[in-house]
Amino acid sequence: MNRSAARGFLAFLLSVPVLQGNGDWTVTYSSSNVCALRGATVDIICTYEYPDNVQYLPNTVRTLWFTKGDKYQPVDLLSDSDYTGRVESSCGEVSCTGSRCHGTCTLRIGDLRQSDSAVYKFRFTTNQPGGEYTGDPGVMLSVTDLQVKVSFLYPTSPTWAELKCHSMCDLAGDPPYIWFRNRQNVGQRINYWEYIQSEGSYSCAVEGYEHLRSPVVWLQGKGDRTVTYSSSNVCALRGTKVDISFTYEYPDYVQYRPNTVNTLWFTKGDKYQPVDLKHNADYTGRAVYSCEEVSCTGSRCHGTCTLRINDLRQSDSAVYKFRFTTNQPGGEYTGDPGVTLSVTDLQVKVSFPDPTDPTWTKLECHSMCGLAGDPPYIWFRNGKKGRQGVNYKGHIPTGENYSCAVEGYERLSSPSVYAPKTPSVTMNPSGEIKEGSSVTLSCSSDANPAANYTWFKVIKGPFSTNLNQGPKLVFKQILTSDSGQYYCLVQTELRQASNWITIHMKYGPKHTSVCSNPSGEIKEGSSVTLSCSSDANPVAEYTWFKNNQPLLWEPSQPHTFPSVRPKDRGTYHCHAENKYGQLSSYSIFLNVTYYPNTPSVTVSPSGEIEEGSSVTLSCSSDANPAAEYTWFKEHEDSVKESGQNYTITNITSELGGNYYCQAHNAIGYHNSTFLLIKVCIQCLKSTSPSWTTTVAVRGIVVLLATILLLVFLWMRRKRASSKACGQGGRPDTVEEPLPVSVRENVSALTNHLAPAAQREPIEEQDEPHYASVHTSRSVNQEVPRCWVGSNVQSDQADAVFYSVVNIKRANAVPGESDKTEAAETSELYSTVKKHPRY
């Protein structure tokens, strides 16, 4: 057979293809069991199918292979560190025919190791409804070494041996083998026969893969002296007994008869200073030698010996060597390399052959090394003997345990397998947790097989995130974001269980913020609520500030302005505090918008404006947003000017009159009062010396006129009194109105003194001011006959003078009703008392 054909034997399929399906979703493996040689490369192939729903085209497919985890949380082989650089997954393009889509995937594992022996499962995910599926139970991969088995066909001639190339799992097709003696290729054949005359090493390999040779087997000889072991490797169960047999030969020299032979077994020391097992304290009472009588035929002698070790322990796993000594010349010989003994326990392997029924379980009694002869097994359920056989199938309820043993060695049963119990979760330290401290979450559960532990944190509702593989989750410096609910998931092949724990961490306020509802600009009279929030445990209390001044508001409640006012405008922030810390928020500006207040107007220069000069009217009003201004003139509809200031250059008398401004923004508007502009042709400047003199003169004239008027009134009264005294009359009441109204005199005087440009017709002035003086005396009073001189005494009652002044102004803005007319009319009363002279 050529080399390319031989390569197919690296992986050997041991069963027919297996179809796994669930309705319209299927995974078909090319074989359920694959056997491959250590160091080789193996391909595991599968095909998958799923329904084609046209509305979800194009199809999207994601695939993975896994051995760890389960179908809900598989660990992709491509990300498994045990397979780094050794695993490849290749999939062909998905094709759809009719209403079904199908694809093919191949998993290739290179440089196979014994640890790669496992069950491999394929999982694919599509964008179709129900688009996740796992092919159970998967493919069982067994990785094995080739071994050389030695047998002696003729007991009378123990030097004639048959060597077979053997593997732990059967290799189909009887592949051709290449044999090596002392590392030299000695030819191709299935079995190898050899007449052993001297020491030599033997190994075998599949043709085409000579680099994957079996371990070397030594057939010992030194000239005519040989030691031949029945097997170079022996596997036995802990607690049982094992027999290691061999034959030995040496030349028969007649002159040295009778033959004397001493034998021993050893694991410690070397062939020059071996430590006899009989003298090894670890084997006291457990190691037994038995040798048959030496027989000599012709010129050779040979014998057979057996080493039996009882009550095997794990520590008995070692390489055992035989040494014999005769009375013949050169009569000491050690059989190298010896026999490797492996002591193992039985184990129960768990699998689930029916993916639709997770409680239907297959249990297999298994050892780490193959036990020859397929011994019968006994199964135990909850400690009671049950069925016989290598496998046990059935429903495994929670709370039950199963074990197995080799028949006849029921006391040497395997460890029990059972579902994990509800795990115990703890937190260290317990109680109050502060930010920045170290916290450890621990999870433990009684389970066999040994459980795998995974920690999760609940994110929201049913969603969680995988945090850590292992029984402990450690936070070296815990953060506030680590607060929350955690659970530990304990998994075995049989079941899974979980338990919960919550971290309540204490910390000061973080992320303190303030917000306004509604946000943005707030119209005057609207309702607005300011809220403060902070991440803190325990909950923080809040203090409010306006323009960095504290406010007496509720410490932990939002504050609402039912009807916001301009005075509420300003910057606000809050301060959060609890026993673990404090933090202030950033500031927000509460922008209250309102229509303009009543504008105020000014004129520059003030007073009368000389014709031809320039005058500027100014308007201002408090408003938010800032007001815009428009100027109007009384009885005119057109806009005179837009802007806060209105400048009239080269003014004329026609431009005089009442002006007002209108302040307006997006909220509303408001008009000012009238501003009267008087234009004169020639005006005295208040800043010139002549103007100052004129004002002083006018004041003196008015004062002199007032004095003359008072003297005149006094003389008239005196004259009237003298006349009354001369006539001897005593009227009960004397009432003499003034012949001239004060208003007339004052107005006439003022009008006469004013410059021509400032004189106004009397009829255009405000309503006249009247002054009346009344004198009266009581009937019963004595009136002196005359008032002459300063020494005249009188008990006359004080004279009372009443003066009434009525003032009325026109409205500020045309068309607006004068609601304050009554208030703008005032009366002035003055009383003059005359005291008697003594």
Image (cartoon, grey):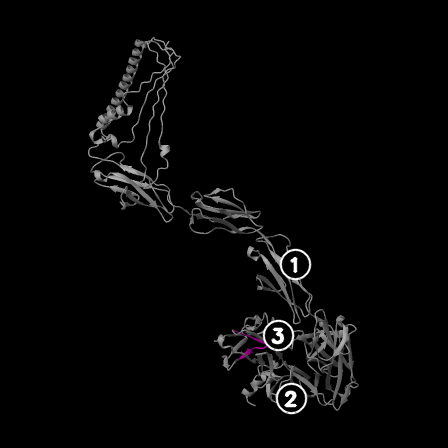
Q: Nearer the viewer, mark 1 or mark 2?
A: 1
Label 3, secondary structure: give it. Answer: helix
Tell me, yes or no, if residue 342 can be seen here.
no
Q: CA distance from mark 2 to mark 3?
A: 31 Å
Q: CA distance from mark 3 to mark 1?
A: 34 Å
How packed mark 2 is, by other alpha carbons closer than 10 Å (few <14, some 14-19, many 20 or more), is many
Which of the two labelled residues, at mark 2 and mark 3, occupies the earlier sequence position? 3
| Quadrant hosting residue 402 | bottom right
How packed mark 1 is, by other alpha carbons closer than 10 Å (few <14, some 14-19, many 20 or more), is some
Residue on which disc 1 sits: 426
Looking at the rendered structure, the kind of residue marked 1 is Thr
Residue on which disc 3 sits: 115
Tell me, yes or no, if residue 805 can be seen here.
yes
Which of the two labelled residues, at mark 1 and mark 2, occupies the earlier sequence position? 2
Left or right placement of residue 600 versus residue 194 in this view:
left
Left or right placement of residue 588 versus residue 122 in this view:
left
Q: Position of residue 612 (x, y in %)?
A: 20, 38
How packed mark 3 is, by other alpha carbons closer than 10 Å (few <14, some 14-19, many 20 or more), is few
Label 2, secondary structure: give it. Answer: strand
Residue 115 magenta-highlighted = yes
Answer above or below: position of 705 versus 246.
above
Of residues 499 and 129, the one nearer the viewer is: 129
Specify the segment rendered in magenta: 103-126
Which of the two labelled residues, at mark 3 and mark 1, occupies the earlier sequence position? 3
Residue on which disc 2 sits: 192
- Image quadrant in which the N terminus is located: bottom right
Label 1, secondary structure: give it. Answer: strand
Residue at the location (76% across, 90% down)? 297
Q: Position of residue 289 (x, y in %)?
A: 77, 78
Residue 17 magenta-highlighted = no
